[in-house]
Amino acid sequence: MTALTPRRGTVVIVLTFLIAVVLAVMPLPDWARLYRPNWTALVLVYWSLALPLRVGVGVGFVVGLLLDALTGTLLGQNAFALSLIAYITVKTHQRVRLFPLWQQSVFVLVLLLLDRLLATVVIGATGREAPGAPFWVSAVAGAFLWPWAYFVLRDLRRRFRVS
């Protein structure tokens, strides 16, 4: 593929990120908010594993800024976390792609726990009360949903021949 050849599937990638952002800001009952996984991080991990030359730190930063603006969090909080997640995923993608799905779920759990840890640091730095144990449940929910997200996104990538 030369530099002048358009890449296939850019629209599919953008749409999956937009759907993830909508799922991230969609109103939920109070009890369900604890279990809401970080959909944008799951989509970012998938595309960074599948297409590390196309989806990486820059995409994580832009999607994170969009998420910061839509959720009202400190500007740059999600951008930094998603950039770091993308960096780690791109750096380890050759190894992680060979893992069985359950080991990939453990890898995703570590990344999502890192996201929660960074959010906890920002919450503490801004003088708000530190979140309790339920704050960490969303990372576990995301790790459990990883196989499902992986299969859905892989099917989309194959169906639309995203390369």
Image (cartoon, rainbow, N blue to C red):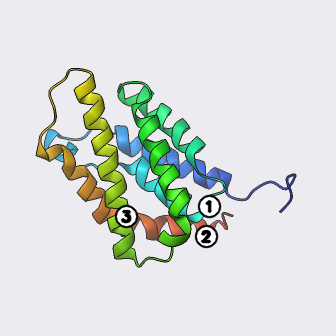
First in sequence, mark 3 or 1: give its number: 1
Q: Residue at x 61, y 70 (%)?
A: 159
- At label 2, the amino acid type is Arg
Residue shown at 55% from the left, 57% from the top: 90
Which residue position holds label 2? 159
Q: Assign the C terminus to one quadrant of the image.
A: bottom right
Q: Which residue is mark 1?
A: 51
Q: Quadrant of the N terminus?
A: bottom right
Determine the residue positioned at 25% across, 36% down.
Answer: 120
Does the rendering let one see residue 132?
yes
- Using a 10 Å C-alpha cutoff, classify the residue at mark 3 as few (fewer than 14 neighbours), some (14 to 19) or many (20 or more): some
Characterize the local packing of mark 2: few (<14), some (14-19) or many (20 or more) Cα atoms within 10 angstroms: few
Q: Please say if 52 is above or below 36.
A: below
Q: Which mark is residue 145?
A: none
Amino acid identity at mark 1: Leu
Please identify the residue farthest to the top as the structure is shown.
127
Q: Earlier in the sequence, mark 1 or mark 2?
A: 1
Q: CA distance from mark 1 to mark 2?
A: 15 Å
Mark 2: secondary structure: helix
Q: Is residue 1 above or below residue 38?
A: below
Tell me if residue 38 comes above or below residue 141 in the rendering: above
Residue at x-position 33% and y-position 52%: 112
Residues at discs 3 and 1 in contact (Cβ within 8 Å): no
Would you say 115 lies left or right of 88 here? left
Residue at label 3?
107
Task: Give me the C-alpha separation between circle 3 and circle 2.
Answer: 26 Å
Horizontal arrangement in the rendering, residue 155 relative to residue 116 (left or right)? right
Q: Position of residue 28 (x, y in %)?
A: 24, 41
Q: Residue 91, located in which quarter of the rendered image? A: bottom right
Q: Quadrant of the rendered structure where residue 33 is?
A: top left
